Image: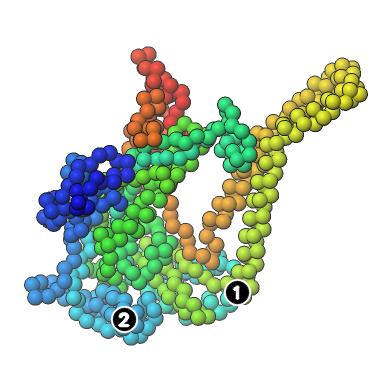
Amino acid sequence: MAIWDQPLQTNGFGNVKQVSANSTKCPNCGSNMVFDPTHGALTCGHCGTLIDPETYDQIGSFGFANPEREYGEHLEISGEDLSRQEVICNACGAQVITHKNTAATICAFCGSPAIVARRLTREFRPDYIIPFRLDKDEAKKCFEEHIKTIDHLPKNYRSQKTIDKLTAIYVPTWIISTDCQVNVAGKGKMGKSVDEEYEEYYKPDGNNYSQLAYGRAFFRLKNVPFDGEKHIADRLMAAAEPFNFNELVPFKGEYLQGYLAESYDELPTDMTDKIYRRLDKLALEVCDKITFGYDEFKTSSDMSTTKYRNQDIKYALLPVWFMSIQYDGIKYQYIVNGQTGKVSGEFPYAKGWETIENAGRKVKMESVSINVAIRRVLYAVPLIAYGFLRAFGRSNRFSSALMVWLFNNPLESLLLAILIGAFIFGCTKIFPKILRAKEKETIASFDKASPHDLAKPLGADAYFDTSSKVYAYETNGKFQSLESGWSYGNMEDFDFKKAAPKLKDDSLGEDATAFQKEGEARGMLS
């Protein structure tokens, strides 16, 4: 039996029709289409079209409007491209596009002077561009100011000669916007069970428990960039984000004069794995903010699935100042956002200082372990107190003396009871929360990049489309809406960062159903 005649794996998105690769053609270009479980759709490897296998509606595309073509017998070089040339590095193979009057004497990526200029062999047709806002002097100033914030650099690393190597480059970038549907699975926690130490060592009760929970969420991610070239590391380009895409303008050749520009060497269809890895991460970050009525909801990436529709792809050039430096046998690369001035890269330590910094991190990790142990003891205070009372209660002499003292000192007895109650309440309710907040703060500091390290990639708050509507509701394990669940949705004023809707003045009317009243009382988000 042929592979396309076998039952399709749909990752929880419902039944799909069995299709034949020989009979299902792309409606845009006529090429054969195949089902790809990663996309959850029929895909065209030629033009990137995505088709819903159940409805046969187009749900998006990894193609783009103006693909470049090779110059050859059937395509003459355009008048606009006659004013451009390719500069090829014989050392590392990098290819950049320049105006024919722009001189390039060394390779911006490896520093080699072995470069060759030639006429373009492929059309150069970006759709959009963000023009440079910073000239070289301004970029150098940004880099110098950034270096001042980094302690323990080698003394000779701040030289002007080093900074003069900054080169302006337009980087080819695929900018993707997409609607997201996420089948969310995770652990919902209530009360003290939000603390992992309590959850692990103490029994759940009516107020403190955790359970597996499911939901479905719909929202839109907007303008997520993916660089389409191989000579600048993906991590380095991600460190230069964010770019203000409101400043995208249609591409004109005049913007290229005086600058280098790379031509893409990876199409969106070549990098779908990379694209979906990042989109999945951002989508689950959004879902982490939705609590589904629990005090805390932790998304499980292994149990959750994502599906994307209505992809929109733009091909644009983004401005960066780039520099590659060889120091002590290691190549360091730096990037300055040519629009915002943000600087990022990995910086070496002066001798011995990296060891000292690692020792400091080890001390912080030890403090987390101590914090955990103290919280375990605090949660056990009621049991410890009960154990003491049981032990002393077995002594008739002690219990008799205690009863006489309590009878003769009623005011002092009341104050003592209040103090004991306050102590136990503080130990089990207040102090563990303070310690847990401190632990979270310490752990978060581990995630923050050191000034010597590359900047961390941006999170979902940078790419969540606040102008689109958000819809989420509880489901069962098959991601079917629960009749008794409460749905939250279609709120244009959804605040992603706080993950809560703004309060509205209007309240439910007299004709509201019990289901609606329950939903208003419970809420969907924390």
At 18% from the left and 66% from the top, the residue drawn is 68
Indicate which disc residue 350 carries: 1
- Residue 518 visible, this orientation: yes
How would you rate the neighbour count of disc 2 (Cα within 10 Å): few for under 14, some for 14-19, many for 20 or more?
many
Q: Secondary structure at mark 1?
A: loop
Question: Residue at the spot x=47%, y=67% of the render?
Answer: 345
Q: Residue furthest bottom?
A: 114
Q: CA distance from mark 2 to mark 1?
A: 33 Å
Residue 424 appears at what percent x and percent y?
Answer: 72, 31
146 on left or right of 317: right
Q: Is residue 325 above or below residue 304?
A: below
User: Image point 60% across, 44% down: which residue?
Assistant: 437
Q: Observer-nearest residue: 147 or 365?
A: 365
Within 10 Å of the Cα at label 1, are there few (<14), some (14-19), or many (20+) other Cα atoms? Answer: some
Location of residue 114 by image quarter: bottom left
Image x and y of residue 315, in percent: 25, 60
Tell me, yes or no, if residue 57 can be seen here.
Answer: no
Q: Which mark is residue 89?
A: 2
Q: Nearer the viewer, residue 209 or 443?
A: 209
Give, as a three-letter code, the residue at label 2.
Answer: Cys
What amino acid is labelled 1 in the image? Ala
341 relative to 421 in the view: left or right: left
Furthest toward the front, the residue is 1
Residue at 89% of width from left, 22% of height from top? 396
Give the x, y percent position of residue 135: 37, 69
* Between 219 and 56, the one nearer to me in the picture: 56
